[in-house]
Image (cartoon, helix red, strand yellow):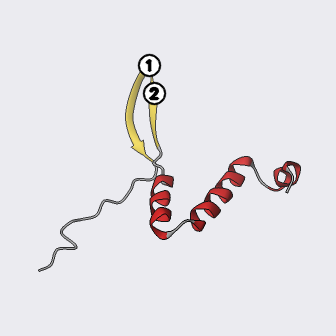
Amino acid sequence: MSSVTWRSVFSYNKFIQITARALRNSLQETHRLAAEKRGLTALRYQKWEDGVGGTQTMLNPTLKKDPTKNAVV
């Protein structure tokens, strides 16, 4: 596929996303799981007013496991 062909179909970021997913899927199970964990990102923002930063807000907060739910009674 030439660069002109894929550029007319999708952006460079989409191209990189597709190739990264293909590479991760081709790895062995243990390496694939480690690579998928590295691929997760957290996004947060902070509103600035008058040169002072406000509170940072997570856009996609990760769910924390409740250790009491897995406890054996």
Q: Residue at x 70, y 53 (%)?
A: 14
Residue 9 position by quadrant:
bottom right
- Amino acid type for the residue under numbered disc 2: Trp
- Residue found farthest to the top: 51
Q: Residue at x 55, y 65 (%)?
A: 27
- Amino acid type for the residue under numbered disc 1: Gly
In this picture, residue 14 sits left or right of residue 43? right
**Front residue of 35 and 62:** 35
**Front residue of 52 and 43:** 43
Q: Are marks 1 and 2 in contact (CB under 8 Å)?
A: yes
Residue 24 position by quadrant:
bottom right
Q: Residue at x 51, y 54 (%)?
A: 39
Q: Position of residue 57 (x, y in %)?
A: 40, 42
Q: CA distance from mark 1 to mark 2?
A: 6 Å
For disc 1, the neighbor class at 10 Å (few under 14, some 14 to 19, many from 20) is few
Q: Position of residue 35 (x, y in %)?
A: 49, 57
| Image height of 56 relative to 25, above or below | above
Quick one: SS at disc 2? strand
For disc 2, the neighbor class at 10 Å (few under 14, some 14 to 19, many from 20) is few
Residue 17 position by quadrant:
bottom right
Q: Position of residue 28 (x, y in %)?
A: 51, 68
In this picture, residue 9 sits left or right of residue 57? right
Residue identifier under label 1: 51
| Image height of 48 relative to 67, above or below | above
Residue identifier under label 2: 48
**Front residue of 46 and 62:** 62
- Residue found farthest to the left: 73
Quick one: SS at disc 1? loop
